[in-house]
């Protein structure tokens, strides 16, 4: 059985076990989200309403009319959503390394912030334009980034949710997936396709625009990660994009004519 070497003094890992590990991690995180999104999209297609008339709410209330209970649920789901990242960190430690091998650390804060801001600025505007075009053409559902009540904790929870999404997605679908597929002998083009298709798949519940737009974003992020060797700039970029989308929608929905609200 072929093996993948680790640090000196540690037993090598078989490719079969690495492949099984990868499937388990994805099955507990974004792979499962991709399957859920496919089922959700199939349900949307079979609805009597057109896609553009249906609404996908990203951050909805979990206990309407009960703000403190709602807050408890919001924090619970944010914390639970990060557990696959904790699992990956543990698996990397078992391998003889840590999340730092993916560039998930705070050793280059200014550089990561600068790069992340530049990527967010380049992708954010084009992503919004693609969404508006897709939604107007009927290929996308109307996406409501926030369905939270107007209470004191709404903005902090939306920001925390943005960072949770960013950390989960970039550590799993970028750093960890690229590392493991490389160890399994995949070529770089195949790795980029796999990572980008996975990223697009769990956004399919939004419609075709969500699928295509996030696949393009996945290619850009893969190339940036290969160049910089760090996920932190991409975590930062993703968090900034989602923060602007979540908080901007919460503040602007119903106040500007160009923003679809369903």
Image (tube, rainbow, N blue to C red):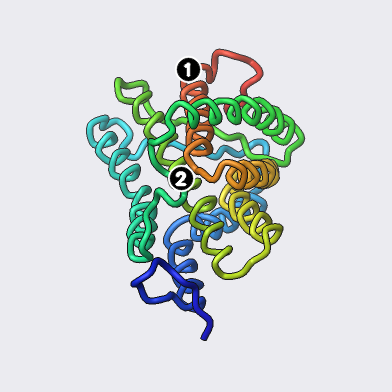
Q: Residue furthest right?
A: 137
Residue 20 spot, x, y in % from top left: 47, 74
Residue 197 in picture, x, y percent from top left: 65, 55
- Asked where in the image residue 98 lies, by quadrant, the reply is bottom left
Q: CA distance from mark 1 to mark 2?
A: 34 Å
Q: Nearer the viewer, residue 239 or 54?
A: 239
134 vs 91: above or below: above
Asked if residue 85 lies left or right of residue 211, the reply is left
Name the mark nearer the viewer: 1 or 2: 2
Q: Earlier in the sequence, mark 1 or mark 2?
A: 2
Q: Secondary structure at mark 1?
A: helix
Q: Secondary structure at mark 2?
A: loop
Q: Residue at the location (59% across, 50% down)?
A: 199
Say which of 25 and 58 sits in front: 25
For image coordinates 71% across by 33% down, the residue present is: 130
Per the rendering, the mark at residue 103 is: 2
Reading the image, the residue beneath label 1 is 251
Taking the view exactly as shown, the residue that stands out farthest to the front is 8
Q: Residue furthest left?
A: 68
Q: Residue at x 69, y 43 (%)?
A: 216
- Judge whether residue 50 can be spotted in this image: no
Q: Position of residue 172 (x, y in %)?
A: 48, 53
Picture coordinates of residue 156 (x, y %)?
34, 26
Q: Nearer the viewer, residue 231 or 211?
A: 231
Q: Is residue 191 visible?
A: yes
């Amino acid at each position: 059985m072929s093996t993948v070497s680790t640090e000196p003094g540690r037993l090598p890992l078989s490719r079969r076990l690495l492949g099984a590990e990868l499937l388990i991690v994805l099955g507990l995180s974004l792979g499962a989200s991709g399957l859920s999104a496919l089922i959700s999209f199939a349900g949307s297609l079979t609805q009597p309403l057109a896609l553009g008339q249906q609404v996908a709410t990203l951050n909805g209330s979990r206990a309407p009319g009960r703000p403190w209970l709602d807050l408890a649920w919001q924090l619970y789901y944010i914390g639970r959503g990060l557990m696959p990242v904790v699992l990956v960190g543990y698996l990397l430690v078992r391998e003889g390394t840590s999340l730092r091998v993916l560039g998930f650390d705070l050793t280059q804060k200014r550089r990561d912030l600068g790069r992340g801001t530049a990527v967010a600025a380049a992708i954010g505007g084009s992503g919004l334009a693609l969404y508006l075009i897709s939604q107007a053409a009927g290929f996308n559902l109307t996406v409501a980034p926030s369905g939270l009540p107007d209470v004191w904790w709404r903005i902090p929870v939306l920001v925390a949710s943005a960072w949770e999404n960013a950390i989960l997605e970039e550590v799993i679908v970028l750093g960890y997936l690229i590392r493991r597929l490389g160890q399994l002998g995949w070529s770089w083009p195949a790795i980029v396709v796999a990572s980008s298709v996975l990223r697009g798949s769990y956004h399919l519940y939004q419609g075709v625009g969500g699928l295509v737009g996030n696949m393009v974003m996945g290619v850009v992020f893969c190339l940036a990660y290969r160049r910089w060797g760090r996920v932190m700039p991409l975590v930062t970029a993703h968090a900034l994009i989602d923060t602007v989308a979540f908080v901007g929608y919460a503040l602007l929905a119903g106040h500007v004519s160009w923003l679809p609200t369903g």
